[in-house]
Image: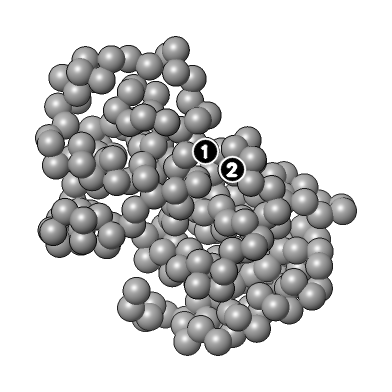
Amino acid sequence: MPVPIAPVQIALLDDHPLFRQGLRYILQTLPYVEAVTEAAELSELLVSCRQRIPDILLLDLQMPNTDGMEVAQVLLAEFPQLKIIVLSMFSADKFVTQMIKLGARSYLPKDATQEELILAIEDVLATGHHFTPHISRALMRNVQRPTRQPATELFNLIRLTSREREVLRYICEGYTAAKIADQLSISPRTVEGHWQKLLEKTGATNVAGLVLFATKHGMVET
């Protein structure tokens, strides 16, 4: 991804000082990161956010005095533009789906590599989200199969083109626009056009909505 024109600020909310220090060290090596702020509790983070809203928040889910899900709800209610990336030891579907539905832009395990973390940050800065195959599978497994409508009936209803179906399938597999463009030998801008059409046709507002919609209606297999 090209380096963003404007420098960005990243905030960390985690109760382990050593883990925060390691993240800070990684983040400060990135040329587009202007500042890194740290907090161990929500109260500290709120003070910082009210002075300046960070572009990205790296959020732990479980802390002694703070519940990550409640933190996300409080922060997004006051700062809806805040882009949250969850870093958690918990990988169960229920945690992933709840956080994505709450508005998190990505969800990574705490044992993710430095490269995976940087990719997630850059994707969120560039596109507003970073969906991994694990996130997509968790969302798809979360959908109740009995409520699905036949795929043919839905295709007739919303009239997806064959290309849009291909793009949707890759979205559900966690591909970025650039990767989809490579797979289909088309330009990223063309992929973004199909992506926007899919949002309009399905009524979804984000990638999580597209994945849930496609799975619910039998367009993709779990």
Identify the residue position indicated by label 1 in the image: 138
Q: CA distance from mark 2 to mark 1?
A: 7 Å
Question: Left or right: 36 with respect to 204?
Answer: right
Q: Residue 185 versus residue 209: which sits nearer the camera?
A: 185
Q: Secondary structure at mark 2?
A: helix
Residue 12 in the image, given as x and y percentages of width and height: 68, 68
Total marks shown come to 2
* Location of the N terminus (image quadrant): bottom left
Amino acid on which disc 1 is placed: Ala
Q: Amino acid at mark 2?
A: Val
Tag 1's secondary structure? helix
Q: Residue 56 appears at what percent x and percent y?
A: 55, 66
Q: Nearer the viewer, residue 119 or 10?
A: 119
**First of labels 2, 1 by sequence position:** 2
Q: Which residue is mark 2?
A: 96
Tell me whether circle 2 and circle 1 mark residues in contact (CB < 8 Å): yes
Name which residue lies at 34% across and 53% down.
Answer: 175
